């Protein structure tokens, strides 16, 4: 089951440029860039601020593609099919976010 987030009434702003999503080894060192299990495309992480009338939250959004996403810090974007994926590992838990893409908005236009 996919948990797609309703982004109606929310705006998203890039707060950190895209970086490679890297594997973490047991000794804490970063390994090679992760790939999508289904498509074998490279995985990237973009940090965005989600804002609505209740406040804001900074989230990391994972994107798949063989080229680095072309988004710039401060740009207003619209996530396409933003998915929440709850996780729990080794006594830790949280929510990971993934989107098909982040569409950059024209200047002066809100989500």
Image (cartoon, rainbow, N blue to C red):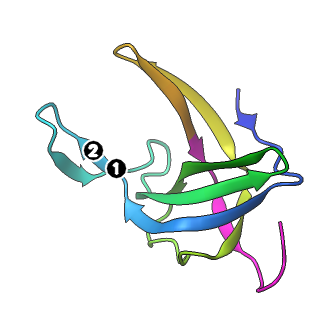
**Which residue occupies the extreme bottom position in the image?**
107
Per the image, label 2 sits on a secondary structure element best described as strand
**Which residue occupies the extreme right position in the image?**
9
**Which residue occupies the extreme left position in the image?**
27
Placement of 84 over or under 90, stated as above or below? below
Using the image, tell me which numbered label, if any, was put on residue 34. Answer: 1
Q: Is residue 72 inside the magenta stretch?
A: no
- Side (left or right) of 110 relative to 56: right
Q: Residue 96 in the image: x percent, y percent? A: 54, 38
Count of residue discs? 2
Choose the circle earlier in sequence order: 2 or 1.
2
For the residue pair 102 and 9, the one nearer the viewer reads as: 9
Placement of 109 over or under 7, stated as above or below? below
Tell me which residue sits at (59%, 67%) in the image.
Answer: 14
Mark 1 is surrounded, within 10 Å at the Cα level, by few (under 14), some (14 to 19) or many (20 or more) other residues, namely some
Q: What's the magenta region? A: 97-111
What residue would you read off at disc 2? Answer: 23
Does the residue at mark 2 contact the one at mark 1 (Cβ under 8 Å)? yes
Quadrant of the rendering where the N terminus is positioned: top right
Using the image, tell me which numbered label, if any, was put on residue 73. Answer: none
């Amino acid at each position: 089951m996919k948990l797609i987030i309703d982004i109606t009434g929310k705006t998203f702003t890039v707060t950190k440029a895209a970086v490679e999503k890297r594997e973490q080894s047991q000794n804490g060192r970063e390994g090679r860039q992760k790939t999508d299990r289904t498509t074998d495309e490279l995985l990237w992480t973009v940090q965005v601020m989600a804002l609505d009338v209740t406040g804001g939250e900074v989230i990391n959004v994972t994107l798949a593609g063989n080229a680095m996403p072309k988004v710039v810090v401060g740009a207003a974007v619209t996530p396409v099919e933003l998915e929440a994926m709850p996780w729990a590992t080794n006594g830790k838990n949280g929510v990971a976010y993934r989107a098909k893409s982040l569409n950059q908005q024209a200047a002066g236009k809100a989500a």
